[in-house]
Amino acid sequence: VPAPPSFDVGKLVTFEVSAGSSLVYGVDPAAIRISNSDGVVRYVMVATSASGARNVMYEGLRCSTGEFKTYARYSADGRWSAVSNPEWHSLFGNMPSKHALRFAKAGACDNATPPSSVKQLVSRLKNPNFRITE
């Protein structure tokens, strides 16, 4: 797994995870990677509370199987801590947060495949109601 990329909270593209949630979720487009070799979309997810507290995770999304994995967490002192035994989890399972599923539906997955480019993914996040269908 590649090392977590740097990210800028000032450049986050946000999206809604659940109505009424006190957390705002976003990704820095510069920290998104789409791997052609394994089909995994890797990104830094930032969840910010109303008080300004942040929870930052480096994750992967495998569209073909509907799974996500958390590789590392960012600490308040500015360092990444690797998850000791990262495992793939279903996007549709009973997870405490549905941020990965919402990210997939908002643009990180096009059914079972990742988008063709980061630019396309970001465009979908910024324009959630505009989808080209064939």
Image (cartoon, rainbow, N blue to C red):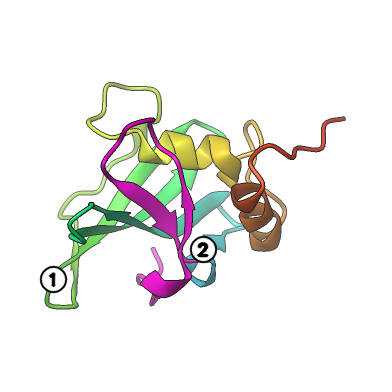
Q: Residues within 10 Å of mark 1 (few under 14, many from 20)?
A: few
Residue 119 appears left or right of 51: right
Q: Residue at x 58, y 49 (%)?
A: 39
User: What is the number of the mark on residue 76?
Assistant: 1
Gap in Å between the C-alphas at discs 1 and 2?
A: 21 Å
**Quadrant in which the N terminus is drawn:** bottom left
Q: Which residues are magenta?
A: 1-28
Where does label 2 land, which residue? 32
Question: Mark 1 or mark 2: which comes first in sequence?
Answer: 2
User: What is the number of the mark on residue 128?
Assistant: none
Q: Residue furthest left?
A: 77
Q: Residue at x 28, y 35 (%)?
A: 97
Q: Residue at x 32, y 32 (%)?
A: 20
Towards the viewer: 98 or 50: 50
Is residue 63 at least partly visible in the picture?
no
Secondary structure beneath label 1: loop
